[in-house]
Image: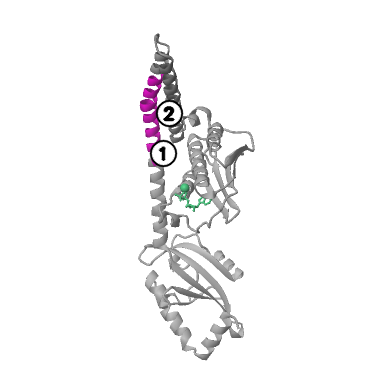
């Protein structure tokens, strides 16, 4: 006998149990008749919404808790036809407060062909508010991070990099002075090489912090440079595929796509143990699509990315926020042992009615 059968048997044997289950259930339950009229709401429903069961019995949609939600009688009928449906809805309590609920509607047919529908509600208002707060926090942090990176990049470029360049020029002209011993010249040459390397490191750091190339040359050349940097790492081969000819995009789109790629590649280096990563970009008349695929370890993607935040992992969340800031989407598909694919789709000109 399956679980449903076992439950039905026990309820037939002890009918009083059904009453207790409905009345004492900690979550709200709504029962509708087949003609969509309301048959019953339990005390948990009354205490959550403030609507009194006695006033609701036999009423038909639109129900008072629908508020301004876009739900219609058509939706209820459609749910009835499907016989089982899960959905999230924004409702209103009797006192006007917002309410977000996860609803699980089930069809039941009892003896003599009587049909009715049971909706189990879970109040997710607080949970949703927390996720929304976290998302706006990550947005602000991401914006602050971008500004701070720009500032540090500018300071590195104008300060230490300029000074190092001057020391390098001085050193080069010293080499040309008369009367220096061969050993001194060799040592100065050696210093010059080290200075040049450090200067190159500083410039690379400054470029990565705020890719000036983006404004100058656009997204694709900046991505090429990023991939070139990636290929300096051992044991990984990174490829950029430009599927359709590059098209211009809004400057904020270029910046966020660059940052998303940077963060995704950084994750590949840090977590994936991958030997190959492909970044592909394609443009349509109104959108740009970026796909980053690695053949690494993969990972279990949580249902809500925000759950990573509890462990101070904000990378994937901030990538997803960058996409939604631009009315775009970011989808993570990962399989353990196979690898990870991140697909980002963004309008080329957000806010231009694409
Ligand atoms: N390409 C990837 N391959 C394998 N695991 C990944 C990859 N990208 C992300 N992850 C997993 O997802 C987690 C969250 O990533 P992220 O939000 O960027 O935080 P962090 O990099 O700081 O750990 C990582 O800790 C890692 O376990
Ligand atoms: Mg990361």
Name the image quarter holding the C terminus: top right
Which residue corresponds to the image point at 46% horizontal and 31% vertical from the top-left? 204
Q: Position of residue 219 (x, y in %)?
A: 54, 34
As drawn, which residue projects farthest toward the bottom? 13
Residue range corresponding to the magenta coloring:
145-168
Vertical arrangement, residue 175 with respect to residue 302, above or below: above
Q: Is residue 76 visible?
A: no
Q: Main secondary structure of the magenta part?
A: helix
Q: Badge 1: few (under 14), some or many (20 or more) residues near its Cα, within 10 Å?
A: some
The residue that mark 2 highlights is 198
Ligand 2 closer than 8 Å to label 1 CB: no
- Secondary structure at badge 1 equals helix
Secondary element under disc 2, as helix, strand or loop, is helix
Of marks 2 and 1, the one in the foreground: 2
Q: Cα distance, mark 2 to mark 1?
A: 24 Å
Query: From what the image shows, is residue 15 above or below residue 116?
Result: below
Where, quadrant-wise, is the N terminus in this rendering?
A: bottom right
Q: Residue at x 45, y 31 (%)?
A: 201
> Along the line of sight, which residue is nearer the eye, 35 or 323?
323
Eyeballing the image, is 159 above or below 29? above
According to the picture, the residue beneath numbered tag 1 turns out to be 146
Residue 200 at least partly seen = yes
**Is 23 on the left or on the right of 297, as rendered?**
left
Q: Is residue 176 magenta?
A: no
Does the magenta portion include 147?
Answer: yes
């Amino acid at each position: 006998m399956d679980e449903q059968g076992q439950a039905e048997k026990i309820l037939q044997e002890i009918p009083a149990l059904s009453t207790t289950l409905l009345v004492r259930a900690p979550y709200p339950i709504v029962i509708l008749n087949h003609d969509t009229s309301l048959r019953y709401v339990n005390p948990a429903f009354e205490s959550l919404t403030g609507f009194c069961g006695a006033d609701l019995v036999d009423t038909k949609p639109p129900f008072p808790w629908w508020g301004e939600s876009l739900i219609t009688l058509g939706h209820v009928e459609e749910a009835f036809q499907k016989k089982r449906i899960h959905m999230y809805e924004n409702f209103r309590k009797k006192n006007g407060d917002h309410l977000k609920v996860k609803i699980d509607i089930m069809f039941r047919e009892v003896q003599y062909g009587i049909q009715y529908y049971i909706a189990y509600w879970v109040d997710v208002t607080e949970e949703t508010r927390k996720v929304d707060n976290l998302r706006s926090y990550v947005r602000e942090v991401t914006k602050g991070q971008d500004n701070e990176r720009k500032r540090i990049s500018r300071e590195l470029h104008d300060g230490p990099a300029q000074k190092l360049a001057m020391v390098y020029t001085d050193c080069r002209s010293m080499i040309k002075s008369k009367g220096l011993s061969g050993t001194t010249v060799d040592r100065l040459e050696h210093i010059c090489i080290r200075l040049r390397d450090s200067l190159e490191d500083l410039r690379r750091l400054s470029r990565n912090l705020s890719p000036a190339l983006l404004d100058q040359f656009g997204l694709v050349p900046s991505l090429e440079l990023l991939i070139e940097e990636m290929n300096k790492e051992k044991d990984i081969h990174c490829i950029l595929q430009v599927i359709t000819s590059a098209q211009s995009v809004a400057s904020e789109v270029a910046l966020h796509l660059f940052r998303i790629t940077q963060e995704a590649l950084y994750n590949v280096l840090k977590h994936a143990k991958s030997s190959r990563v492909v970044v592909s970009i394609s443009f349509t008349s109104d959108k740009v699509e970026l796909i980053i695929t690695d053949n690494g370890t993969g990972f279990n993607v949580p249902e809500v990315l925000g759950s990573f935040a509890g462990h101070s992992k904000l990378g994937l969340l901030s990538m997803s926020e960058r996409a939604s800031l631009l009315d775009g989407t970011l989808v993570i598909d990962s399989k353990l042992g196979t690898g990870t694919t991140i697909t980002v789709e963004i309008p080329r000109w957000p806010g231009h009615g694409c």
